């Protein structure tokens, strides 16, 4: 519980400090802080979501690619079409000045074409309570029931999040 509170406080502080990584945003962190931003990592975070019902099939795929400190998002789905845009990424470390431990990742991507995520927006991808032997390499997969699944109304589905981030 205490670690979760520390992570949530770090994310709140981080969200407050994020201006942007894609042009107008900056994220400042140093080796003493409990978080790292896109400038410190390279790799990808991917969300694949599917919701099914008798008259419904919604799909969504979000790929956030971090290259040279910039986050580029590719979004496609049955409800949104296909588009790309700038995003941002934050990795909150459970502990500072250690090689590894608990971490969480938040990724902000545009929800529709032409939009940019802003400070205070909810992240599109949230990865919580993961563990790494070394913060230099964060990899994993989380598959879970779609948050809008509702057996009573005949809705089922899954969300799968995969990530592979290497500290630069």
Image (tube, rainbow, N blue to C red):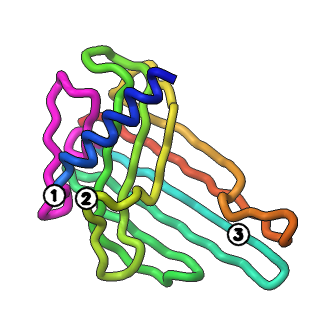
The answer to whether the residue labelled 1 contacts the one labelled 3, judged by CB atoms less than 8 Å apart, is: no
Q: Nearer the viewer, residue 103 or 47?
A: 103
User: Tag on residue 39?
Assistant: none
Q: Nearer the viewer, residue 166 or 115?
A: 115
The answer to whether the residue labelled 1 contacts the one labelled 2, judged by CB atoms less than 8 Å apart, is: yes
Residue appearing at x 61%, y 53% in the figure: 160
Considering the image in quadrants, where does the C terminus appear?
A: top left
Write down the residue under mark 1. 25
**In this picture, is 74 found above or below 71?**
below
Q: Earlier in the sequence, mark 1 or mark 2?
A: 1
Helix, strand or loop at disc 1? loop
Q: Earlier in the sequence, mark 2 or mark 3?
A: 3
Residue appearing at x 68%, y 49% in the figure: 144
Q: Is residue 47 left or right of residue 31?
A: right
User: Tag on residue 51?
Assistant: 3
The crowding category of the residue bearing disc 2, from other C-alpha atoms within 10 Å (few below 14, some 14 to 19, many at least 20), is some
Query: How far apart are labels 2 and 3 at the CA level?
Result: 29 Å
Residue appearing at x 43%, y 29% in the figure: 5
Q: Earlier in the sequence, mark 1 or mark 3?
A: 1
For the view shown, which residue lies furthest in the top direction? 98
The span shown in magenta is: 20-41
- Which label lies toward us, 1 or 2? 2
């Amino acid at each position: 519980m205490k670690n979760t509170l520390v992570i949530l406080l770090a994310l709140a502080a981080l969200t407050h400090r994020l201006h942007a990584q894609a042009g107008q945003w900056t994220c400042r962190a140093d080796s003493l802080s409990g978080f790292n931003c896109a400038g410190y990592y390279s790799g990808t975070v991917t969300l694949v979501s599917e919701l099914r019902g008798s008259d419904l099939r919604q799909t969504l795929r979000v790929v956030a690619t971090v290259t040279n400190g910039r986050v580029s998002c590719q979004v496609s789905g049955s409800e949104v079409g296909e588009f790309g845009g700038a995003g941002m990424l934050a990795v909150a470390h459970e502990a500072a000045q250690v090689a590894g431990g608990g971490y969480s990742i938040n990724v902000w991507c545009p929800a529709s074409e032409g939009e940019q995520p802003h400070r205070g927006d909810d992240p599109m991808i949230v990865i919580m309570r993961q563990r790494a032997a070394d913060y230099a390499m964060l990899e994993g997969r989380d598959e879970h029931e779609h948050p809008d699944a509702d057996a009573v109304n005949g809705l089922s589905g899954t969300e799968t999040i995969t990530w592979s981030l290497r500290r630069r």
